């Protein structure tokens, strides 16, 4: 804005601050709650400043978990979540890069049919196809396995479509120059297309990692063994305990811990992420 | 080093034929330019040589070897594209070395070749830059460097100078010509710019609608255009065309509107009584005394170019009202020092043998007078 009007400046800052407070306050409360002993929750009123049980609560959560909820250590659940989120993000990117490459650069019978079939699956999110998918995964014996957690979520129309659009902007002359240089299809893919898609890949990785990390319904459905629980579904299981009060201090510690990896991924890849969304390297 | 041969080369996209059969031989080391308006098939022809388009019919051979079924990399060619087509994520060095790396050449050999080419093109200090950090002219040089390092038997240029500004274009034109002379590599160059075509070519192919209208040296094409299309396309400003008739005995040539064009020493017996189209280049019309004048031009518009001056106007009778003017606009190129103003009537005469007669139906050349 070129205008310089103090009132507008204060007002807009005020609105922004209010927005930050609305978003940040629950997080702060979760953090505060995770630093008190269990008795603190009985009063129903929570102090505004952190207490002194930080280490106890977090080490309990990380190493032992809640006995009433199966006693799965949060550390293991986070490991499971990480494996699943990474497998989904990397798998989706690999599959969609290759399928977009095939659809854009090769003339084969049924090419457009393939593209539209992929495109139509955009209308079918995990929740819609969850029962048939479960049936398939169960029949393949993939219940309670990392493969079962990640493979059904890997096929991705969104990422394929995004890469297709990007590949369409790569000038034909570049493809021809590579052909004259003697680069075969895979060589061209590896040496030219992949490096050019770098920022797009980074942006997608961030989005897909968080998508994978936040999966709730699917892991809940196909894991029955504690050793494959993921952290997002684990939090819910900690709250819904039979015959006792939920252990809020450990639940909150777990929630805070569950937030760290996605935040870390966003911060680490922020610059590439923004560039991948706003510009294409020419 | 290689000669290129075309034998009955045709190209169709589905039912649409875009190249109607090209036959020609390009000698080893020759610089041949294909020129024509957009959509005439000139780029398609070049891309068929490169192997980027399939050949529908006929054969193309490079160095005596038929290349119809060969991949571009096996044809021993290098191509320079209009948009340079540099790999944006690679440095200048990597761009030039990429083809050699794929060909599994040793590191030392690649280094030596790239350095040699960079020296030739004055790119030595830019080798570590990315293409986006270069100016248009520098990118063009890198594109040429990428072609040179391959040491191919043939260079293919697809309108390489179209994206440069006018001054740079002239400079790069000279550099390309010098480079080609030095390397002695057979070159095929596509352009729509007739100045580029005239200056670069050993031989010129003028294409129109998928047909090679004329294949000859630039001067031969300028002096004896084979068709009305060629005559109008080569030369700037373009040739003037006027409808005319030849008298029954072939001794007089006059415009359809009745003005005499040429009557002295004329013997066109075989064409007697025919309607023709007369072409005359603006630079072949000279200012002369009234007594010698063949044509009278009523000037409507004057363009001064400094060294030259262009006068546009209508032909009028020697005496009588200008209202009887012929419709066709005639352009005359005069030395810049000539004093011509709008409304003047110029007395002109066409130089000897500079009136080209074309068949009005087929456009084919009939005679010079």
Image (cartoon, coloured by chain):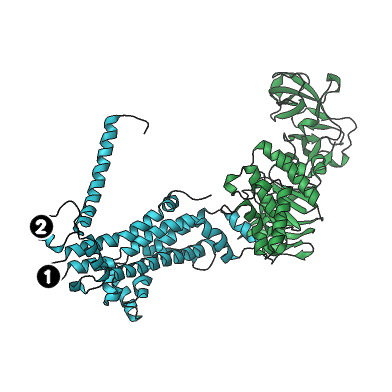
Residue appearing at x 58%, y 55% in the figure: A172
Work out whether residue B286 or residue A159 is closer to the camera in this orientation and state it. A159
SS of the residue under disc 2: loop
**Label 1: which residue?**
A244
Q: Is residue B365 above or below residue A134?
A: above
Q: Does the image show residue B277?
A: yes
Q: Could you say where residue A113 lies in the image, as x and y percent from the top left?
A: 45, 66
Badge 2 and badge 1 both on one subunit: yes
Q: Chain under label 1?
A: A
Which label belongs to residue B214? none
Q: Which chain is green?
A: B
**Label 2: which residue?**
A44
Q: Which chain is cyan?
A: A
Placement of the N terminus of chain A among the 4 image quadrants = top left
Q: Is residue B5 above or below residue A65?
A: above
State yes or no: discs 2 and 1 in contact (Cβ < 8 Å).
no
Q: Quadrant of residue B47?
A: bottom right
């Amino acid at each position: 804005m070129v205008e310089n009007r103090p009132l507008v400046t204060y007002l807009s800052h005020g609105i922004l601050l209010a927005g930050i407070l609305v978003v940040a306050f629950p997080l702060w409360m979760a953090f505060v709650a995770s630093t008190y002993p269990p008795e603190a929750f009985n009063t129903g009123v929570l102090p505004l400043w952190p207490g002194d049980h930080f280490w106890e609560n977090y080490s309990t959560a990380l190493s032992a978990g809640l006995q009433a909820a199966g006693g799965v250590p949060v550390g293991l659940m986070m490991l499971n979540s990480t494996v699943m989120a990474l497998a989904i993000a990397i798998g989706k990117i690999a599959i969609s890069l290759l399928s977009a490459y095939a659809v854009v650069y090769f003339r084969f019978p049924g090419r457009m049919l393939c593209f539209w079939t992929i495109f139509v699956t955009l209308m079918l999110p995990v929740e819609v196809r969850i029962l048939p998918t479960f049936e398939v995964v169960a029949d393949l014996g993939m219940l309670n396995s990392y493969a079962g957690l990640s493979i059904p979520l890997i096929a991705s129309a969104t990422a394929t479509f995004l890469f297709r659009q990007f590949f369409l902007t790569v000038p034909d002359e570049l493809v021809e120059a590579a052909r004259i240089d003697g680069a075969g299809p895979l060589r061209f893919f590896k040496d030219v297309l992949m490096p050019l898609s770098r920022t797009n890949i980074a942006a997608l990785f961030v989005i897909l990692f968080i998508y994978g990390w936040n999966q709730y319904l699917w892991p809940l459905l196909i894991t029955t063994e504690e050793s494959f629980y993921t952290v997002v579904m684990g939090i819910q299981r900690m709250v819904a305990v039979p015959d006792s009060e939920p252990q809020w201090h450990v639940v909150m510690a777990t929630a805070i811990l569950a937030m760290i990896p996605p935040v870390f991924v966003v911060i680490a890849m922020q610059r590439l992420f923004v560039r991948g969304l706003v510009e294409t390297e020419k | 080093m290689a000669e290129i041969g075309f034998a009955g080369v045709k190209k169709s996209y589905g039912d649409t034929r875009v190249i109607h059969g090209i036959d020609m031989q390009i000698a080893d080391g020759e610089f041949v330019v294909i020129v024509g308006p957009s959509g005439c098939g000139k780029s398609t022809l070049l891309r068929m040589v490169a192997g980027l388009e399939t050949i529908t019919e006929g054969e193309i051979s490079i160095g005596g070897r038929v290349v119809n079924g060969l991949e571009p990399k096996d044809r021993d060619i290098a191509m320079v594209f209009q948009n340079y087509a540099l790999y944006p994520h690679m440095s200048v060095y990597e761009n030039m070395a990429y083809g050699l790396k794929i060909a599994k050449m040793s590191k030392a050999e690649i280094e030596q070749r790239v350095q040699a080419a960079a020296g030739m093109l004055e790119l030595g200090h830019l080798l570590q830059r990315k293409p986006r950090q270069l100016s248009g002219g520098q990118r063009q040089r890198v594109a040429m460097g990428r072609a040179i390092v391959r040491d191919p038997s043939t260079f293919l240029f697809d309108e390489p100078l179209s994206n440069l500004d006018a001054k740079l274009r002239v400079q790069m034109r000279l550099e390309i010509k010098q480079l080609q002379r030095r390397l002695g590599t057979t070159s095929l160059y596509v352009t729509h710019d007739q100045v580029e075509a005239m200056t670069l070519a050993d031989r010129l192919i003028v294409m129109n609608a998928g047909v090679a209208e004329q294949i000859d040296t630039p001067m031969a094409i300028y002096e004896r255009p084979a068709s009305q299309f060629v005559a109008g396309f080569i030369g700037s400003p373009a040739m003037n065309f006027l409808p005319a008739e030849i008298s029954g005995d072939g001794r007089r040539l006059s415009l359809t509107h009745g003005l005499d064009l040429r009557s002295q020493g004329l013997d066109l017996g075989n064409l007697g009584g025919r309607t023709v189209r007369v072409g005359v280049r603006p630079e072949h019309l000279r200012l002369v005394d009234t007594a010698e004048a063949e044509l009278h031009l009523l000037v409507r518009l004057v363009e001064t170019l400094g060294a030259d001056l262009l006068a546009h106007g209508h032909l009028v009778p020697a005496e009588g009202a200008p209202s009887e003017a012929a419709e066709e606009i005639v352009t005359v190129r005069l030395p810049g020092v000539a004093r011509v103003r709008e409304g003047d009537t110029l007395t002109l005469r066409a130089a000897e043998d500079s009136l080209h007669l074309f068949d009005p139906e087929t456009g084919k050349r009939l005679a010079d007078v």
